[in-house]
Every structure is written in structure tokens, then in C-alpha cells.
Amino acid sequence: MSEAEIYARLLTRMPEHDIQPSLDRVRDALDLLGNPQDSFRMIHITGTNGKTSTSRMAESLVRAHDLRTGLFTSPHLTSVRERIVIDGEPISEDAFVRVWEEIEPIIALADERSKERGGPALSYFECLAVLAYAAFADAPVDVAVVEVGMGGVWDATNVADGDVAVITPISMDHAQWLGDTLEEIATEKAGIIKDGVPVVVAEQSDSARGPIVAAAAERGATVRWEDEDIEVMDRQPGVGGQLVTLRTPAATYADVFVPLHGEYQAHNALLALAAVEALMSGGGEPSALDGGVVEAGFDSVIVPGRLETVRTSPVILVDAAHNPAGADALLGALEEAFAFERLVGVVGVLDDKDAEGILAALEPVLDHVVVTHSSSPRAIDPEELADIARDVYGDDRVSVEERLPNAIDAAVQEAERGHEHGAGVLVVGSITLIAEARILLRADERRVSPVPVVRPTGGDA
């Protein structure tokens, strides 16, 4: 059996954006496997934006302590194996196939038990969660950093008891599955809080904060709130990233280099650092981490598809800002780290997203948009998306290309029109669009170095 064959089988199951509100199927499978999720410590991460970046930074910090690590994130960009990372590298194809062949009969048995109770078979994402936990136990890892797929209470990853919970900023997203209000969405996400575990929480609106306070009180969990217990004290943008000073309950870490652009990444770094500090302290009073280890951990962080430079001359960036909050954060990072004379967007959005909100958030920095779509069946038709874009940008600033390669070519030509230097292209929107753009531009092979504008060291420009 090959990775491609396994992936084809997974795709026949319910898609990952469909939530069946029960953890019984995953629990059954893991029980039959001897509960591999109990064999390692875990940092569990939820929220709306910043989950993957925070997860990657936390994993890198843990690995810098010479511990074996697992990382489970979603979705993937090129290969499904990217979702299951062991010691900083995607699980090997041999290990992926071997672990799948071991768990497939167990999943089949769990499917049958669910059907006997009148329920469905395990979904695509549920199978991947079982596979990840089994692979981590098989490695074996010391610590796993696990990002929820969606929500929290009913997310397949929530069968495991995290030793630390992290909640990144919560905003409106996936409303048809998680709820129509921030209170409902926050209640779902607060479901990862377990009895007595420390919880690290990003700055939240009052609407989202209330359910987190209630869940923590019910579980007897200690909450470390951003801007109360933890804080980004200073940040200086620079070449290839930013220098940050971060305050946690145990220490102040000054002038740490984070190789990622944008203020939001400084806050993600803060959450990751506080979470690892709590983990290494065993849930008790946190103690400071070694400064050299912290620097090494952050220095090795790579987050594909997040303000990633995939080509130069002209600069082509890709970013998976797939909701308005993500687009707002991207806007600030673009203005801070790059100085384009002309920037053209290639935009494709899925039908369950706020396309108008995304387009409006990016309007101040995009001189023109080329509307297209990914191969996802959920992608908004380009003509429909173009109508939305014209309401925001006007007719003269919107073009339509049915195929992504043509859209990128058109955007390059539009960006370079009258601008030999300082032209740029931003591919933005759905993660499926970003994945396909990275494949077209062979981003993993190129490993292009970032080309930010060098700013004065005296402060944010």
C-alpha cells in the first residue's frame, strides 16, 4: 500500500469540515489500540486564527529541550503526511503506511460498532487523529503538540487529555458548525480545558472571554491571560522577522528573534512560550526556560503558507488568510515588512467564508485583484467572487481567471506594469488555493529567503 492509496481511502469518508457530535467512535478505536494518546504529554491548541503558527513554535521550543516531539496540524499543503510531524519532519512514508496498516482493521471494527449504534463510520479527520496518536506512540515521542481540527468539545483530538491548553484569538468562523455567536464558538473551543491543567489564553473579546472563564472555573484550571499574566512587551521588525521581548509568569525573555513577520506572530510566540513554560514545569508554578534554548527553538521555526515568500523578481507571497480576522492581521504584516510600489492579489475563497470581509480587509494594500478558485468543490465560482470583489474594488481593479496558473501569470503582468522594481503578487484566501499555488511555484524545493524592507531599529515603521 502507498501513501496515495491510503489518502484515496481516507477521502471516501466524511469530510473533515463535517462534525458529528460524538467522540465515541474515536474513543472506541483508541481503546482497541491500547489508548496510545496516554503515552505522551500534550499541549492542546484551539482558537480561530494563529493555531498552526503557535503549534509549530511550541513544538520547536519543546524539541529544543532535546525531547522527542510530535506535531499534529491541519490542513496540509502538499502531502497528508505534513499533518503528522515527528521530531520536526513529516512522518516518513514507510512509517505512515506501516502505522495505517496496523490501525486500519481497528478503525474498521470501530466503524462497525458505530453503525450498530446507528451512527456513522469514522470521518476523514477522525481517522487522521487516530493515526497521529498511534504514530506518536509508535515513535515514541515525549511530547505532542496537537492542533484541533475545528472547535474543541467534539473535535476528534479532544479524546486526549492535554497537559496544557492554549486558546488563540477567537473570532467568527465556521459559524454553521460551531455557532452563530462568539459566545457559542468560545464555548465549543473552551471544551479542550481539562481538570486542573494550566490554560494559556490570547487576548479575547468580552464575548469570548466569558465562556473561557466559566469553563476554567468548572474544571479548576489555572488561566494565564494575555496582557495580565503574559505580555508582548516590545517588538522590533527587522530583516527576516522580528526581535521580541516576552513576559511570562516566570521570566522576561528579552530580544528573542522570531523569524516570522507581523505583530500577530509575536503574540503567537508569546502563547507558545508560556505553554512550553507551563509544560516543562509539570503544571506547577512555572519556572524560567533557558534563554539559549528559547532562542534556538524560535530560530528554527518555519510556517509554510503564512506570509511565505515563494518567488522573487517579482516577489510572490502566499498567505492562508481565510477569514477577515486573518486578513486584518496579514494587512499589518504586509505594511510593516514590505514596501511594494504595486501589489496585486490572486484571491480564491471557499463558499463558507466571508469573502466580502476578506476582500475589504485587504483593499488598502491591493492595487488590483485577480479572482480565481482552487480545485476544491467548496470554492466560490470566480464570476460570483468577482461580483463581490467589484463591489469593494470597482470594475477597473478586478480581473477574472478561471485557472490558477493563468491567474498568477496575469497578476505578475499586472504588478509589473510600469513598475520594474517594487512589484509584488500576493496569493491569498483558501488553504486549498495556497496549497495549489505552492505546488505550482515549487515552494518546498526553492526555500526562497524572505525579502523584507529593512526598517529603522528605533521602532515600528
Image (cartoon, helix red, strand yellow):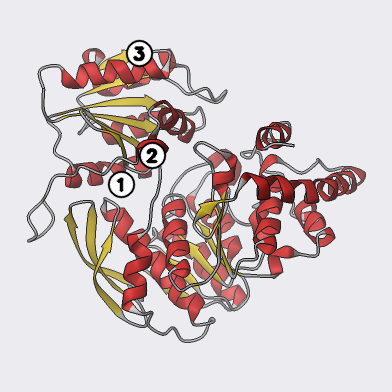
**In this orientation, which residue lies closer to the viewer: 16 or 316?**
316
Compared with residue 404, is residue 238 higher up or lower down, i.e. above or below?
below
Q: Which of marks 3 and 1 is nearer the N terminus?
A: 1
- The residue indicated by pointer 3 is 400
**In this orientation, which residue lies closer to the viewer: 172 or 385?**
385
**In this orientation, which residue lies closer to the viewer: 299 or 307?**
299
Residue at horizontal 55 percent and vertical 67 percent from the top? 68
Q: Can the viewer see residue 63 in this picture?
A: yes
User: What distance separates the C-alpha of mark 2 from that of mark 3?
Assistant: 20 Å
- The residue indicated by pointer 1 is 329
- The residue indicated by pointer 2 is 321
Q: Which of marks 2 and 3 is nearer the N terminus?
A: 2
Mark 2 vs 1: CB contact within 8 A:
yes
Q: Could you tell me the amino acid type at mark 3?
A: Val
Q: Earlier in the sequence, mark 2 or mark 1?
A: 2
Q: Could you tell me the amino acid type at mark 1?
A: Ala
Mark 2 vs 3: CB contact within 8 A:
no
